[in-house]
Each structure stands twice: as structure tokens, then as C-alpha cells.
Amino acid sequence: MHPLTWLGVALILIGVALVLLPILGKYIDLSQVPSWLIYIYHSNGFYFVTSPLLLVLSIVAFIAYFLMR
């Protein structure tokens, strides 16, 4: 497989994990996780979870894709 395919698979798996985090966040205290790994915003029953690390990796992959074309 192409290396960019492996990156895509890894990003999909990370994305699935991040989709599951709000569900787990209701039952497990995720405040001990470093903020550079997972950022959690919750207010009045609304949970928003993102990963600054995932955002940076996505931007790098996007730039690498266009530079290799």
C-alpha cells in the first residue's frame, strides 16, 4: 500500500476514537488527559472533543499531498 494510504487509515482510526470520546467522557473522567492530545469543551450537556494533534497531522498530510502532486 502507498504510504499516504497508511496515513489515511491511521487518521480514520484516530477519528473513530475521537468520535467515541464524548460517549466515554460521560462515564470516565478525561480531565487527566493532556490538552495537546485531547481538548474537551463541555457546557450544559454539550460535549465537543477535538485533538490538536490530529488537526496538525491533518494539515501536514494535506500540505504533503499537494506538494507531491
Image (cartoon, rainbow, N blue to C red):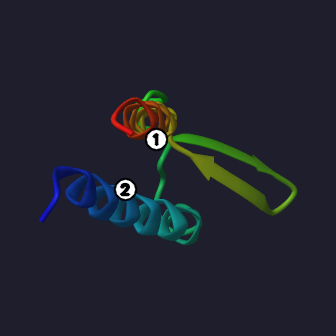
Quadrant in which the N terminus appears:
bottom left
* Residue for point 37% across, 33% down: 64
Q: Give the CA distance from mark 2 to mark 1.
A: 8 Å
**Residue 61 located left or right of residue 10:** right
Whether residues under marks 2 and 1 lie with C-beta atoms below 8 angstroms apart, the answer is yes
Q: Nearer the viewer, residue 62 or 50?
A: 62
The answer to whether residue 54 is left or right of residue 7 is right
Q: Residue furthest right?
A: 44
Mark 2 neighbour density, 10 Å: few (under 14) some (14–19) many (20 or more): some
Please state, as top left, top right, bottom left or bottom right, where the C terminus lies in the image.
top left
Which residue is situated farthest in the front direction here?
A: 69
Amino acid type, label 1: Ser
- The amino acid marked with disc number 2 is Leu
Residue lying furthest left in this view?
1
Q: Position of residue 3 (x, y in %)?
A: 17, 51
Please determine whether, in this image, residue 66 is positioned above or below residue 8: above
Q: Secondary structure at mark 2?
A: helix
Looking at the image, residue 44 sits to the left or right of residue 60; the answer is right
Question: How many other residues sit within 10 Å of disc 1, few (<14), some (14-19) or many (≥20)?
Answer: some
Query: What residue is rendered at 33% in x and 35% in y?
Result: 68
In front: 34, or 61?
61
Task: Report x, y in % for residue 52.
Answer: 51, 33
Report the residue marked by disc 1.
58
Instruction: Answer with left or right where residue 38 lies relative to residue 69.
Output: right
Mark number displayed over residue 11: 2
Q: Is residue 36 above or below residue 27?
A: above
